[in-house]
Image (spheres, rainbow, N blue to C red):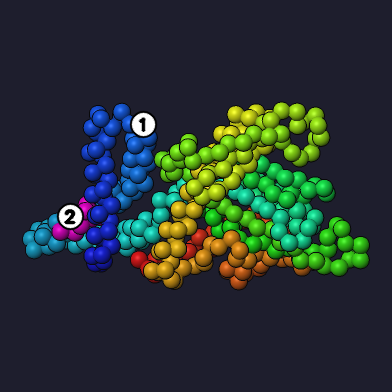
C-alpha cells in the first residue's frame, strides 16, 4: 500500500523535533534551568511515540525496497515475494497506528485532572443529585485504580453537595473523563416531594486537565492571597483558625477557594493547583475556539452548558444525548461508565480521522 505523503510529512516533522530536543537536552547548560528542562523533557516525551513510528515506517520501507530489488534475481524471487507479502500485511496496521497517533493531542495523554461538580437548578434535590454523581464517579475511579483527592466541598442541609471539587490521577484520566463535562439532568421523585410528583433537577460537571508549573507561569505580583476561617459543618469548634485560603488572580479576576484541610499551607498549595488549572483551561479554551472556527466538524463543543446526559429514575434509564443511546441506570450508578466513555472516545476518534 502507499502511505499518504501528507501523513508521512507530518510524522517526519514530529520525529525531527524529537531528534532536535534529544540533541538539545544532551547539552550541559540545560541542567542550569530546571523549569526549562522539565518543559523540554515533557515535550520530548510526548514526541517519542512519533519517533518510534517513524523509525518503524522507515524500516518497513527499506524492507519493501530490498524485497523489490531481489525479485529480479531468480534464485531469491520466492523469498522476496514472501517478504513483500509480509510487508503488505504489516503496512495497514502501521498506517492505522500513525493516523491514531497524529490525531491524539498531547493533552489526551495527561493523567491528572481537576473535577468539579456543582448543583444546578432544583435546590436541595439538585444538591442530592450532585452527591449521587460524586459517588458514582468515585466507584468508577476505584475500579480504574485511580487516586482522588478532595479539594473543597460545600455540603447541603440534607447531605447533598452544593459543590465538590477534587483531583483525580490515573493513566488515561483526561482522555476518558473530559467527556463528562456538561449539564447532567435527573428526573425522579425528590425526597422533599410529599405528593409523589416527578421533578427535573440538574447539576453541572467540569473536568479540566490539571496544569503543571511549566504549563502556566504565574507572577507572584499578580496574586492576592486572603486567609479566613473555614466555613461548613462543625460550628465554632472547627473554625477557630484562619486555615481557609482564597487566591485571586488579578489580571483575569479568577478566584479560587480551598478550605478542606486544617492546614493553611496545604489549602494554599491546593488552591494554587486549582488556579493553575483554571488559567490553563482559559488558554486551552481560547485555542480550541480558534481551531474550531477553522475546522467546524467536531464531535461536540465540550461547552459546559451543553446537556450531555439524563438520569431517569422511574424508567431505570440513563440517556447520553451525544450518542443517542440508553444505558441501565443501576449499572451507571454502580460506576460502570466504561461502555459510555468508550463509545464517546471512539466517536471522537472517527471524527478526528476524517479531518486528518
Identify which residue is drawn at 69% across, 30% down. Answer: 242
Q: Residues within 10 Å of mark 1 (few under 14, many from 20)?
A: few
The image's mark for residue 34 is 1
Q: Which residue is mark 2?
A: 62
In which image quadrant can residue 166 be found? Answer: top right
Q: Quadrant of residue 181?
A: bottom right
Q: Earlier in the sequence, mark 1 or mark 2?
A: 1
Q: Is residue 23 magenta?
A: no
Distance in Å between CA atoms under marks 1 and 2: 40 Å
Mark 2, secondary structure of its residue? helix
Would residue 146 be visible to someone looking at this image?
Answer: no
Q: Is residue 160 visible?
A: yes
The furthest residue to the right: 194
Q: Is residue 58 magenta?
A: yes
Above or below, 323 relative to 179: below
Between residues 58 and 147, which one lies in front from this camera angle? 147
Q: Does residue 218 sit above or below 119 in this rendering?
A: above
Looking at the image, which residue is at 87% across and 58% down?
192
Which x, y percent locates residue 89?
30, 61
In the visual, does 346 lie left or right of 190?
A: left
The residues colored magenta run: 57-65
Quarter of the N terminus within the rendering = bottom left
In this rendering, is residue 8 above or below 231? Answer: below
Where residue 307 appears, x then y in whole percent?
63, 66
Residue 318: which quarter of the image? Answer: bottom right
The residue carrying pointer 2 sits among few (fewer than 14), some (14 to 19) or many (20 or more) residues within 10 Å by Cα, namely few
Residue at 51% from the left image edge and 50% from the top image edge: 252
**In the image, which disc is placed on residue 81?**
none
Picture residue at 24% right of the left edge, 44% below the top: 19
Q: Is residue 132 left or right of residue 340?
A: right
Amino acid at each position: 500500500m502507499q502511505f499518504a505523503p501528507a501523513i508521512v510529512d507530518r510524522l517526519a516533522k514530529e520525529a525531527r523535533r524529537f531528534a532536535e530536543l534529544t540533541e538539545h537536552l544532551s547539552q550541559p547548560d540545560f541542567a542550569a534551568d530546571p523549569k526549562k528542562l522539565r518543559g523540554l523533557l515533557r515535550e520530548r516525551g510526548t514526541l517519542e511515540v512519533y519517533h518510534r513510528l517513524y523509525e518503524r515506517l522507515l524500516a518497513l520501507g527499506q524492507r519493501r525496497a530490498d524485497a523489490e530489488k531481489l525479485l529480479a534475481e531468480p534464485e531469491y524471487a520466492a523469498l522476496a515475494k514472501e517478504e513483500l507479502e509480509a510487508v503488505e500485511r504489516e503496512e495497514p496496521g502501521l498506517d492505522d497506528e500513525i493516523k491514531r497517533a497524529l490525531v491524539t493531542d498531547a493533552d489526551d495523554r495527561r493523567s491528572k485532572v481537576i473535577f468539579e461538580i456543582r448543583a444546578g437548578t432544583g435546590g436541595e434535590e439538585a444538591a442530592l443529585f450532585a452527591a449521587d454523581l460524586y459517588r458514582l464517579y468515585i466507584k468508577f475511579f476505584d475500579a480504574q485504580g485511580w487516586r482522588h483527592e478532595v479539594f473543597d466541598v460545600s455540603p447541603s442541609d440534607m447531605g447533598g453537595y452544593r459543590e465538590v471539587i477534587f483531583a483525580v490521577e490515573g493513566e488515561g484520566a483526561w482522555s476518558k473523563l473530559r467527556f463528562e463535562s456538561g449539564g447532567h439532568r435527573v428526573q425522579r421523585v425528590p425526597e422533599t416531594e410529599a405528593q409523589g410528583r416527578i421533578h427535573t433537577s440538574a447539576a453541572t460537571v467540569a473536568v479540566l486537565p490539571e496544569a503543571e508549573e511549566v504549563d502556566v507561569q504565574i507572577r507572584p505580583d499578580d496574586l492576592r492571597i486572603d486567609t479566613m476561617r473555614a466555613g461548613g459543618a462543625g460550628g465554632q469548634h472547627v473554625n477557630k483558625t484562619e486555615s481557609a485560603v482564597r487566591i485571586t488572580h488579578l489580571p483575569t479576576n479568577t478566584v479560587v477557594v480551598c478550605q478542606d484541610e486544617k492546614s493553611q499551607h496545604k489549602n494554599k498549595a491546593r488552591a494554587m493547583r486549582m488556579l493553575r488549572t483554571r488559567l490553563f483551561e482559559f488558554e486551552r479554551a481560547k485555542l480550541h475556539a480558534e481551531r474550531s472556527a477553522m475546522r467546524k466538524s467536531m464531535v461536540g463543543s465540550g461547552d459546559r452548558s451543553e446537556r450531555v446526559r439524563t438520569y431517569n429514575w422511574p424508567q431505570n434509564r440513563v440517556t447520553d444525548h451525544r450518542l443517542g443511546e440508553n444505558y441501565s441506570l443501576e449499572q451507571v450508578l454502580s460506576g460502570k461508565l466504561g461502555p459510555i466513555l468508550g463509545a464517546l472516545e471512539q466517536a471522537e476518534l472517527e471524527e478526528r480521522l476524517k479531518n486528518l
